[in-house]
Amino acid sequence: MIEYIHKITLWIHIPFGFLSLVLFWIPVAVKKGGSLHKKVGWFYYISMWVVLVTSAIMSVCNLFMDKYIAALYLGFLALVTTYPLWYSYEILRQQKEWSNRYFWIRKTFVVVMFLSGVGMILLAGIKFHFQNMGVMMAFFGVLTLPAGRDILMTKAMAMDKETKLKMHIQGTIITGIAAYTAFFAFGGNRILMQVFHLPVQWMILPWILPTILGLIYSRYMKKKYRVA
């Protein structure tokens, strides 16, 4: 029964995942704030939610099928993608002062993100001794640690227009990073190994490269739109 649920969920996940990979670039390329940007951005937002919900379901299925590492990675990726996807849209709906709902949901997210990152680092060291898969686990765990600074945020914090734009750009690009990371690590790795004949030791690249390129692109976009 679990395998059947996993298979059905996967067949929903794949087309929406591919759609997200394509749609991501359209809002990036077109005029910001325009009609096309908003419409395609909304479809991207919805398709990514489908991807995340199906990822969470498959992660639970993997647990029941005793595929603990796959469940861990898939669940962790779903978590670290859900937060930026959520705030990339919610931030645009906030006034200068945060709503209580936004504040407490965001506060909960950053606490869970920080603790998950610490857990990934500890697991990478204790179980894998920071070798092989432990390297990737530690890498992604470290990426979530900056969320810890937001644990101390207060309701008194206010946002101007540039802050909203900064978080919208940042959140959207992070979701794109996660989408491409998941694609190359779970599905695209077969293509890389069979077509490009990359050695097994190089298969860490699909996990890390989208993050590095995405962070560079994020800084470029913020500078382009004069966001501090």
Image: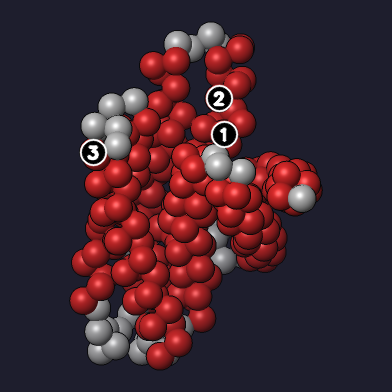
Per the model, the C-alpha gap separating discs 3 and 2 is: 25 Å
Q: Dots 3 and 2: beta carbons under 8 Å? A: no
What residue is drawn where x is 38% and y is 83%?
104
* Callout 1 crowding tier (Cα within 10 Å): few <14, some 14–19, many ≥20: some
**Residue behind mark 1:** 186
Which comes sooner in the sequence, label 3 or label 2? 3
The x, y position of residue 38, in whole percent, is 63, 65
**Residue behind mark 3:** 125
Q: Dots 1 and 2: beta carbons under 8 Å? A: yes
The type of residue carrying mark 3 is Gly
**One can see residue 107 in this view:** yes
What residue is drawn where x is 42% and y is 89%?
99
**Residue behind mark 2:** 189
Give whichever of 225, 13 is nearer the camera: 13
* Callout 3 crowding tier (Cα within 10 Å): few <14, some 14–19, many ≥20: some
The image quadrant that residue 179 belongs to is top right
The x, y position of residue 80, in whole percent, is 43, 56
Against 184, residue 4 (above or below) is below
Which comes sooner in the sequence, label 1 or label 3? 3
What residue is drawn where x is 37% and y is 31%?
133
Against 83, residue 8 (above or below) is above
Q: Nearer the viewer, mark 3 or mark 2?
A: 3
The image quadrant that residue 166 belongs to is bottom left
- SS for dot 3: helix
- SS for dot 1: helix
| Position of residue 17 in the picture relative to residue 66 (left or right) | right
- SS for dot 2: helix
Quarter of the image for the C terminus: give it: bottom left
Against 129, residue 193 (above or below) is above
The type of residue carrying mark 1 is Phe
